[in-house]
Amino acid sequence: MRLIFGTLIFMLFFTGCQQKLYNLEFDKTKKIKKDKIKKDETKKIKKEQSNEDEVQDGPNELFDESGETKVPFSKNDTIQYKDIDEVRSVLLLYSSNTIGKYAKIASSSALGYALSSKTPFLIDTIDMSTESLPSINKALTKAKQYGHKDIIAIITNKSYQNLINADFADDFNIFLPIINKNNISEIRDNFTYGGLDYKKQLQLLTDKINGESSEFYDRSSLGFLLHKSLINSGGNLKFSRIIEQKDNSVRNIIAKNRHNLNSSNLFLNTNLIRTSMILSTLKGTRVKTKRSLSTQINYSPLLLTLVRPSDRSNLFITNSIKDIDPKITENILLLGGKVRFNWIGFATVVGVDHFMNQDGEKIEPNIVENQVLYGIDIYKTKDGAFVRR
């Protein structure tokens, strides 16, 4: 007679080489046999778990006297499955020193999705100190030792070259949540690119407007990407101004360029704070644009709080995050993940779904030449919500 039940075991490992390993295993269909654990080791694990909130924002690696990694348990020591091949195994790879709070959002979102699945799963997370080539080499070596085949690598564009040059990079199926293949020069067949197509979002906006355009952008890599894309879009751009960090008075900048902004289609290729300041200042400086436009960069509920409804009544924003199953969303939220307004959380879930969901309908089924093709919707704001047009 088959016994059906679910068990979740969560262990927090701190490993050497400036890497942290989180190991999660879950089986909803198999009876699990736990190995005997020594009392002193059990106390050690409990102590590490109780301090999780204290160390999650900074490194807290454990080393032995020789500097080698201390791994209290391997996954084979922890849980034994009768049919290990039935367990879906995914590795999350990132550097929390590089992506900050998004590391926790990504791992929590991945776990929330996996808990909603009917498939037994194992999720490992390796937190590298940096995105350097040596760090990635060590991480992939560890992934190979643990027998992983599928990796979600939350690597930034500037470190992509380190990933493709790393040892064993060709031995894995790798999903990249924040890299779009159109923004890089070298494509790998074993990589799936899950990054957002900001150029396509921007092109959709320019295709919907007529008349002259103006733009504010910032000095971030995304700001420059959007600025360059806008210039190449064929739109009638008559005015463009970069907002520098040292620019303390957005009001003065807008007032001095009132004649360039009036009656134009204003593109806001700036971060959320700058965008909110610009929108809140336009009316006070007697500037009346035809409309304001922005991409995913400003699709955030915080915008609804920072800007009065009257100051964003003519704002149009593109979004490629689609609604997913409410039960999955609830599980993700309960674990501290985010998918509704957070691209890294959403794209990480798309990656987990890509590897784990072999038979059902996928969240994002359209993958063409290794690039996930996300849909794009245009939204306006109404009171305290985004409304699809």
Image (cartoon, helix red, strand yellow):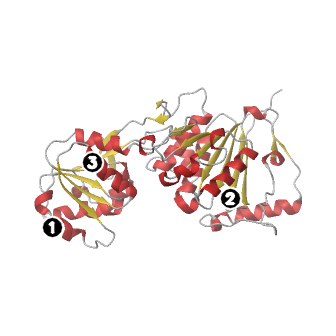
Residue 20: give its label: 2
Indicate the position of residue 160 as horizontal and vertical percent values: 52, 49
Point 15% across, 64% down: residue: 257
Compared across the picture, whether 161 is left or right of 296 comes to right
Q: Amino acid at mark 3?
A: Leu
**x, y (%) of residue 192?**
53, 38
Q: Which is closer to the viewer, label 1 or label 3?
A: 3
Q: Residue at x 15, y 67 (%)?
A: 255
Of the residues shown, which amino acid type is indicated by label 2?
A: Lys
Residue beneath label 1, please? 255
Dot 2: few (<14), some (14–19), or many (≥20) neighbours within 10 Å? many
**Hey, what amino acid is under mark 1?**
Ala
Q: Residues within 10 Å of mark 1 (few under 14, many from 20)?
A: some
Where does residue 216 sit, x and y in percent of width and height?
25, 58
The answer to whether residue 274 shows anywhere in this view is: yes
Percent of width and height locating residue 105? 54, 54
Q: Secondary structure at mark 1?
A: helix
Front-most of 158 and 365?
158
* Cα separation between marks 3 and 2: 41 Å
Sooner in the amino-acid sequence: mark 1 or mark 2: 2
| Quadrant location of the N terminus in the rendered image | top right
Answer with the quarter of the image where residue 222 lies: bottom left
Question: What label does residue 230 carry, if any?
Answer: 3
Q: Quadrant of the C terminus?
A: top left
Q: Please indicate, yes or no, whether residue 328 appears anywhere in the rendered image.
A: no
The span from disc 1 to disc 3 (Cα, nearest Å) is 23 Å
Distance in Å between CA atoms under marks 1 and 2: 50 Å
